[in-house]
Amino acid sequence: MQVRPPRSTGNKGGFGSDSRSGARPDPRVDPRVDPPGVPVRRAALRVLDGVLRRGEALEQALGPAARHIDRADDRALVHAIAAETLRRLPDLDALIDSATQRPLPDDAKARMALRMALVQALALGTPAHAAIATVLPLVDGGPRKLVHGVFGTLSRDEAALPDVPSLPDAVALRWEAAWGDAMVEAAMYALAGQPALDLTLADPAETETMAKRLHGVSLMPGHVRLADHAAVPAIEGFGEGRWWVQDLAASLPARLIGGATGGGGAEAIDVCAAPGGKTMQLAAAGWQVTAIDSAESRLARLSDNLARTNLSAAIVAADAFNWAPKAAADAVLLDAPCSATGIFRRHPDVLHRVRPSMIAEMAELQTRLLARVAHWVRIGGVLVYATCSLEPAEGEAQIERFLADNPHFTLDPVLPDELPHGLLPAAGGWFRSLPGMLAEQGGCDGFFAARMIRTG
């Protein structure tokens, strides 16, 4: 298996012939005050430290790291530098190692500064002299000369990043063992692309109309995909609540439950519901929904989304292990906490902070949650389990174990006509999306979902 594709030999994404990487920071600048542009880079360095050293999610690290950054565009740049560094980390490190006599420690500030300078110059379009000048103040003492020298060497060599990013070796090996070489290659190409924006429509009858009005395409009823778009609140229909943003794969678990039956009194429980995409799907399909989540801040977002879309649900702020419904429900949807490796296209931090120990911890939690919520399903009712993970331990293995331990549940196989054209149910009867699927249509996140019926 080739983990890293060949590096580009051209200037595309490189320094270019007009690089001014030899420029030095103005010595007249007061060293006690950051020059312009440096606070943004300092914040990005804190984000990367939070992800790579403390194992925080990128969005989690961004808040405290950028708390002193007031301008929205500056905060966006903090996110862009950190996210693109994480997306390109193995290839950035390969460039750095090619220009140093001895490898720098992974957590050395000099390596971190070089990663940030290089990703700006080679991937984000920052002029080389600005890329290096704004990171040098982050490095104290002698390492400044090292950082400047390595950057200058790579600049003179017209170094470039490969068109297709490499996966971290540990991730590539893990996914190769689970899914094969083709999936690993597809994941690298997925990482290189810009994910499209998927919208779930409140009224599937508007699919053709909204697809035309938004200049998008639809891959199944109630879905519109936009390749190019304005800021989300500026897209037509946002204010009226006619749709919400939701990856196509993420919309499928609620679709597997289907529409409510029984005269509009059918009850569904959405476990781990925030930020609310699946709750809104169920409510729009006629269910009386109870949405439970332990994160009150995320539930506030769910409330806002329900208000915008003119949909309703009973919202419960509680831990699923400390709460139970008064009566069994007709449907229970458990979109369980997971490693989230399936959303690596938008959240490249998962490639670096998710390790086998975390996957094992998440799998144990999922097993406990499944056992807990199984009692909330009435006889004849449906239980859908889902995760946005590419790890079999959090998907296929969970359902095989659950069905073996719970003979009063039986798998209700997913049917081909319940999925977008181009996706098929897995041989086991569940749904599994992988990198490379729907590639010609823009791809989708990695997801797993299984539907089960309680028979006794």
Image (cartoon, rainbow, N blue to C red):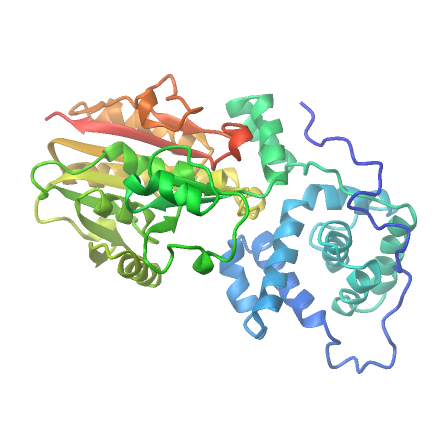
Residue 23 or residue 94, whichever sits in front:
23
Point 58% across, 43% down: residue: 194
Quarter holding the C terminus is: top left
Residue 80: percent from the left, percent from the top? Answer: 62, 56
**Quadrant in which residue 413 is drawn:** top left
Q: Quadrant of the N terminus?
A: top right
Q: Position of residue 4 (x, y in %)?
A: 71, 32
Q: Residue at x 57, y 75 (%)?
A: 70
The answer to which of 55 and 267 lies nearer the viewer is 267
Residue drawn at x 35%, y 19% is: 428
Q: Is residue 361 visible?
A: no
> For residue 30, what is the image quadrant?
bottom right
Image label count: 0
Q: Residue 44, how many percent across, how many down?
A: 64, 62
Please state if 74 lies on the left or on the right of 271 as rendered.
Answer: right
Above or below, 100 relative to 420: below
Seen in the image, is 324 located left or right of residue 183? left
Q: Nearer the viewer, residue 49 or 213?
A: 213
Expressed as whole percent of the image width and height from the top left, the position of residue 169 reads: 65, 34
Q: Nearer the viewer, residue 226 or 405?
A: 226
Q: Residue at x 8, y 37 (%)?
A: 262
Q: Is residue 347 left or right of residue 158?
A: left
Residue 36 position by quadrant: bottom right
Using the rendered image of the protein, determine whether residue 134 is visible from the camera's viewpoint: yes
Q: Is residue 225 left or right of residue 93?
A: left
